[in-house]
Image (cartoon, rainbow, N blue to C red):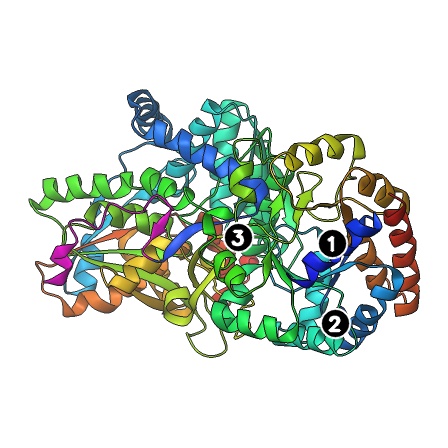
Amino acid sequence: MPEDLLNSFMTGPDENGRFGDFGGRFVSETLMPLILELEAQYEHAKTDPTFWAEMDDLWANYVGRPSPLYFAERLTERLGGAKIYLKRDELNHTGAHKINNVLGQIILARRMGKTRIIAETGAGQHGVATATVCAKFGLKCVVYMGAHDVERQSPNVFRMKLLGAEVVPVTSGRGTLKDAMNDALRDWVTNVEDTFYCIGTVAGPHPYPAMVRDFQAIIGKEAKEQMKAAEGRLPDTIIAAIGGGSNAMGLFFPFLDDKDVAIIGVEAGGKGVNAKMEHCASLTGGRPGVLHGNRTYLLQDDDGQILEGHSISAGLDYPGIGPEHSWLHEIGRAKYVSITDKEALEAFQLCCETEGIIPALEPSHALAHVAKIAPDLPRDHLICMNMCGRGDKDIFTVARALGWEMGEVI
Amino acid sequence: MTRIDDTFARLRAENRKAFVTYIMAGDPDAGKTAEILAGLPGAGVDIIELGLPFTDPMADGPTIQLAGQRALEGGMTLKGTLDLVRDFRTADDATPIVLMGYYNPIYSHGVDRFLEDAKAAGVDGLIVVDLPPEEDVELCIPAQAAGLNFIRLATPTSDDKRLPKVLQNTSGFVYYVSITGITGSGAADAAKVGPEVARIKQSTDLPIIVGFGIKTPEAAEGIAAVADGCVVGSAIVDRIAKGHSAEDVLTYVASLADGAHRG
């Protein structure tokens, strides 16, 4: 098989930050010395046992890792096919996988002597995680959040403020996650001396996609060991939702060289992947372009102007995707599908009813795909899905979508 | 030799500093841009930077962000931008035009096709904000091969270690960014810029033009005095945003040009 010529899918990126044709360092000159310095510091930290000892300690005692690998028995029965396991990263402190990465970047920022942390956030989960870790270490924290997202994710805005962060509503562009990222980059270019930019997903200029992946890879490493302990073997299929793609990359990465493990990424199909672009499925509905420091699949028009996507989930509402996913898509190592708002809402309810777990809308997309494929798979087929966030933040959105007035619920 | 090289040779012979302006193509519509473009050389502008609109201008402040939005809402495209250059060239074959923008619209158009079209339209140089030297193979090297200047931004963070990398493969002139920050913010300080320009000059024979944070004729004079010229962008775009007539905009540009040429 030709793919055997590749010794490993886990060696990327190359020295220029490329995964095949994707990735790179497409930033203004002012930022180049900063990202080169960050790369050098990260390369050093990566092989420094004291760095990982600090991470392991905080992962165990502050975040609550390892997160359980849970056999979803009633969900499995209901779907009547494959055996479904959920990797419970929604049980982490702050309620999502985001904190895995934030801890790594903040420890690095402290080593670099940076005193001011900036971040962008969509659903608010990365913003909350960043505000949390900044509070823990006494660092100044500024979070850029699209004005539209500030409105639809108000509980997370309040949490960030409680944690002492300054939340800046972004009104430039259309006021969503991509505009928040633009404004965070503008802040960074202005405050180069004391500021560390803590990116929340596996995108941005090199080394961010690789660094964030390495911090999130704890998810896949744990899942691998836990699945071996539970079933004595690896899963047959692993599945995760994708906006920028950090929870997915974290689950996928340790399995990339296990060629018998099927890998499926689930993009947000919004109102349907069609010409109207009311979706956020960069891989199924976009084409390669350059934005936010890297080359990757993007939603764009014929003139190369970036389009706003649509998703019921603010965390998936981003017109791009991490470059490593673009590469895995092109070489065919992972398969990418899309799930609509409506399908995600159905899966959200299914999970509440069968497992007593209120999932975030982001992993509800992954779950909807599990619900699609599990019934046709044999009972000994093992699926591992990343339950990357809990749904507390989404209850207002879901209530509205289901036509409930919150006052009437009781 | 491009029109940019010719212009600097002439300015050197006349012992004058270069005055460079930036406006956004299609802000608020193609007609207004064409009218202003046609008047810029007469107002004393030596080199024209023409902004190529992009939805996500991450190095620009609010003034130029909004100019780009107005242009895109008015239907401006990469092709429309090149049409503006082509029309300008029917009356002016001497004043250099530098396209300034971001990589994605160019990448989307296709690099080879873009270079061919830009050259044919009469473009002389490119400033592409999100293409640092590390990405030279993307556009910088093909552009030079096609006979277009690729003008690099040097910044206060381009220290002595990095400077050679920034200057390598740069042609036409070096655009020194006077501040760490976005366009339209802060104020360029001649006392700080002077030594930086001198530092960069030790490593290159190219002219050094300073931009970002220059808003008045006095500031243009002060900065031009310590460099080979200066760029004004946001302050002009701001007047276009306020609906000033092309004539008023050009009168203001002429006052800035006088300042820069005194420098």
On residue B9, the disc is: 1
Seen in the picture, residue A386 relative to A138 is either above or below; the reply is below
Quarter of the image for residue A111 reads: top left
Q: Please, what secondary structure does the residue beneath circle 1 have?
A: helix
Same-chain status of marks 1 and 3 = yes
Tell me where residue B146 appears, x and y as whole percent: 53, 66
Q: CA distance from mark 2 to mark 1?
A: 16 Å
Which amino acid, by three-letter code, is at mark 1? Answer: Ala
Image quadrant occupied by the N terminus of chain A: bottom left
| Chain of the residue where label 2 is placed in the rendered structure | B
The mark nearer the N terminus, 1 or 3, is 1
A76 and A290: which is toward the camera: A290
The outermost residue toward the top is A50
Q: Which residue is mark 3?
A: B131
* Residue located beneath label 2 in the image: B93
Q: Nearer the viewer, mark 2 or mark 1?
A: 1
Are circles 1 and 3 on residues that touch, CB within 8 Å?
no
